[in-house]
Image (cartoon, rainbow, N blue to C red):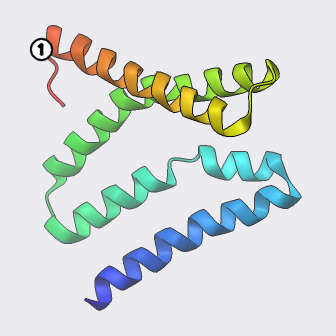
Amino acid sequence: MAYYIIKIIITTALIVGISEISKRSSLIASLLASIPLVSVLAMIWLYIDSKDTHKVSQLAVSIFWLVLPSLVLFIVLPLLLKQGLHFYLSLSLAILATIVSYGLMIFILNHYGIKL
C-alpha cells in the first residue's frame, strides 16, 4: 500500500509543481509539461511492477501512436479561444475534437493491422 501512495505522491507533485511554475513562467512550465513525464512515469511504474520490458515496449509504441491525435487539442483550443469562445466551452470542444481524433487514429491503425 505504501508503494501506491508513493506513486500517487510523486505523480501529483509533478503535476502541481508544473501548475505552480506556470504562474511564474509559461515557457518553463510548457517545457516541463511537454516532456512526457506521465508517460515516462507510467513506463517506470510498469517496469518496476512487472520487470517486463516487452510490456514497456508495447506501451511506448502505443503512446507514440496516440500522441499524434492528442496534438489536436493544442491546435483547436487556441483557435477557439482566439475566436472569443468561453474557456470551458473551448476546452470542451477541443477535448471532443481530440476524442474524435483518437477514434480516427485507432480506426486507421486497425485498418493497417497495427494493434495497440
Q: Could you classify mark 1 by the number of other residues whose Cα lies within 10 Å: few (under 14), some (14-19), or many (20 or more)?
A: few
Q: Is residue 10 left or right of residue 113?
A: right
Question: Which residue is found at the position 63% from the left and 21% from the top?
Answer: 75
Find residue 31 and report its horizontal and vertical position in percent: 70, 46
Q: Is residue 56 left or right of residue 105?
A: left
Residue 1 versus residue 11 in the image, above or below: below
Residue 74 versus residue 41 in the image, above or below: above
Q: Is residue 5 left or right of residue 98?
A: left
Q: Nearer the viewer, residue 78 or 114?
A: 78
Residue labelled with disc 1: 113
Question: Farthest residue toward the bottom?
Answer: 2
Q: Nearer the viewer, residue 88 or 69?
A: 88
Find residue 47 and report its horizontal and vertical position in percent: 23, 63
Q: Amino acid at mark 1?
A: Gly
Q: Quadrant of residue 76?
A: top right
Q: Quadrant of residue 83?
A: top right
Q: Nearer the viewer, residue 48 or 25?
A: 25
Q: Secondary structure at mark 1?
A: loop
Residue 94 versus residue 46 in the image, above or below: above
Question: Which residue is found at the position 14% from the left and 26% from the top?
Answer: 115
Question: Which residue is found at the position 25% from the left and 11% from the top?
Answer: 108
Q: Quadrant of the C terminus?
A: top left
Find residue 55 and report its horizontal and vertical position in percent: 16, 49
Question: Which residue is found at the position 61% from the left and 35% from the top?
Answer: 91
Q: Quadrant of the N terminus?
A: bottom left
Find residue 89 and report its horizontal and vertical position in percent: 63, 32
Question: Farthest residue toward the right?
Answer: 24
Number of numbered discs on residues: 1
